[in-house]
Image: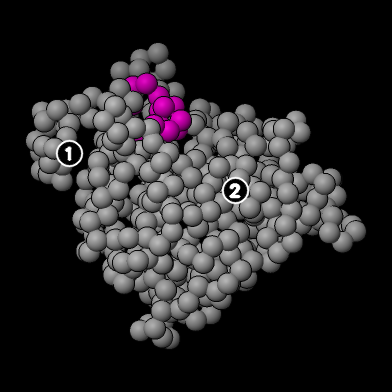
Amino acid sequence: MQPNQLLFLTLVWAAGVVGVAETAPGTVPQSSRLVIKNQGFLPFADAPINYRSSVLDDPIARLRKKLDNGEVKLNYEPGRGYLRSVLDALKVPVSSQALVFSKTSFQFPLITPSTPRALYYNDDVYVGQVHNAKFLEFIAFDPRQGAIFYVMDERKSDHPRFERAAVDCVQCHVASSTHGVPGVMLKSVLTRPSGYPVGGAKTYVTGQESPLSQRWGGWYVTALRGAESGMGNRVMADSEHPAAIPAGYLTSSSDIVAQLVLAHQTQMHNLITQTTYKARLALFSAGANSEMALPRIQPPAEQLVRYLLFTNEARLDTPVAGNTSFAEDFTARGPFDSHGRSLRQFDLKTRIFRYPCSYLIYSETFDAIPTPAKQYVYQRLFEVLSGHDQSADFSNLSVVDR
């Protein structure tokens, strides 16, 4: 992304931000508003998706209700703002921290290799913080609507609150890299010492199929082993000497295992949303004759099945080990079967997980896939895992895996 493109994105953001009224230092007035919600073009705003709808059930919407009801209170820390308190309230582990030093966020002027953007996540929500920035950034997944974007004023307030930022964020977050739906993506870019991407250099969208050699450009990566195979920790001017993570973050790590899981999860979220949207649109167009919708429902559902089962997953060049508790924290969440097995258990020798089926099959977003599409997914899973489908497309699955 060129600097002028980044400037354009910042202007797009600024066009949606209302200035905050003058007030006493350290407080934010109740009447201030961070974003304009109902102006500007918004994809999928019409029926049947109704993306502007305020009827939401994502993790941030639930937390907002608890704040309004006084069930939860967010605590402000000097120098850290509300970050730690928000992570606790959303049950987002600190060990998931990933640090991005490329200027590829709307708050890019404050992002550099010495002040990277910090990202944290769990199965349903992503949280971003930039040092000395005005806003915490959030992407939360609603079962029906997919990615919902929020910001939160970082200044101390008696009543901190989340504001939805749909119009502003979809400028970048509805794209081919999100499968054309509101979503989330990771990008790997060759980065200058300033943090700006190198003009003309190739940009990679990262998912589970991405070779490790193309990952982590513009990101810090920490590991006990395995991090040397990617583009992480390096800037163009001194690519032979990795940069060191600066102080001042919740942890001193940007764990490689957390980033491997993040690469899988982001595109899995997008494919679930794509399947849901296309099924809803097809059923809406077909009316009472739902059979007419099936030709439009099955292709995205098939794409979801293949990603769910890690077909074409990039093999790990060498065994990988993180340097935080992320792997243990992640695995402990289960669920486990009667033999103690879980889809969250890791391999990290030749692939990410021991059992190549995504843990997001347990998620609320997966459960909310419209019935005809979900039935297709289940039927295809049965065909593949029972061995009825022995096509080369699923050759990554051994008999034991199935």
Question: Which residue is located at x 34 percent, y 32 percent?
Answer: 336
Closest to the observer, 174 or 338: 338
- Does any portion of residue 41 appear in the rendered image? no
- Does any portion of residue 138 appear in the rendered image? yes
Counting residues from the start of the chain, the first of labels 1 and 2 encountered is 2
In which image quadrant can residue 45 be found?
A: top right
Residue hosting label 2: 87
Judge from the rendering whether residue 320 lies leftward or rightward of residue 81; answer left or right: left
Magenta portion: prevailing SS class = helix
The kind of residue on which mark 2 rests is Leu
Residue hosting label 1: 401
Q: Position of residue 69 (x, y in %)?
A: 75, 30
In which image quadrant can residue 369 be found?
A: top left
Does 364 appear in magenta? yes
Q: Are marks 1 and 2 in contact (CB under 8 Å)?
A: no
The numbered disc on residue 31 is none
Judge from the rendering whether residue 382 lies leftward or rightward of residue 330; answer left or right: left
Say what secondary structure mark 2 lies in.
Answer: helix
Q: Where is residue 158 in the image (x, y as percent from the top left)?
A: 82, 46
Q: Is residue 135 above or below residue 164?
A: below
Closest to the observer, 189 or 118: 118
Instruction: For marks 1 and 2, give the CA distance.
Output: 35 Å
Judge from the rendering whether residue 61 lies leftward or rightward of residue 299; answer left or right: right
Question: Which residue is located at x 71 percent, y 64 percent?
Answer: 79
The kind of residue on which mark 1 rests is Asp
Range of residues picked out in magenta: 361-373
Say what secondary structure mark 1 lies in.
Answer: loop
Q: Where is residue 240 in the image (x, y as percent from the top left)?
A: 35, 84
Count neighbours of disc 1 (C-alpha within 10 A) and say few if under 14, some if 14 to 19, many if 20 or more.
few
**Where is the C terminus found, in terms of image quarters?**
top left
Q: Position of residue 239 (x, y in %)?
A: 38, 82
Question: Which residue is located at x 68 percent, y 60 percent?
Answer: 80
